[in-house]
Image: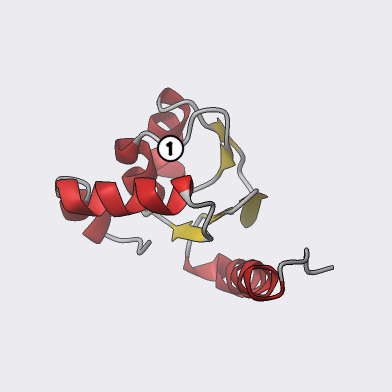
Amino acid sequence: MPGGRAPEKLRKNAKVLEVVRAFFSADKPVAAICHGPELLASAGVLRNRSATGYRTVAQELEAAGARYRDAEVVVDGNLVTSRQPSDLPAFMREIVKKLRERRSGQPDG
């Protein structure tokens, strides 16, 4: 899920939220950076999950039931989250690991 201002608009679209929930239900990899986790909060999929995002969304993520962590990347099961563009190298590394795991059916270690 993209960051920036896109999540502000996307989170109002019921179909987008339905797709987010479907990915979580199917345990498919989900990645969100910056303000992207706002979509996850709106979809109601953050309860009891560890996540990060841009510092201004920390309270919203916690209100949605997430354990907010201020880290460049947080991986919790199928979920990969990052704070900001400077975290992209770590974010992309973890996304690639998740995709490899999905393809092979084995944890990428």
Q: Residue at x 71, y 67 (%)?
A: 105
Which residue is label 1 attached to?
A: 45
Left or right, residue 64 beside residue 100: left
Residue sticking out furthest to the right: 109
Left or right, residue 4 beside residue 32: left
Residue placed most toward the observer, 44 or 60: 44
Where residue 76 sits: x, y (%)?
64, 46
Residue placed most toward the observer, 67 or 22: 22
Q: Residue at x 46, y 48 (%)?
A: 24
- Does the image show residue 5? no
Few, some or many residues within 10 Å of mark 1 (<14, 14–19, 20+): some
Label 1 residue SS: loop
Where residue 91 sits: x, y (%)?
59, 67
Where residue 23 sits: x, y (%)?
43, 54
Residue placed most toward the observer, 6 or 107: 107
Where residue 62 sits: x, y (%)?
47, 28
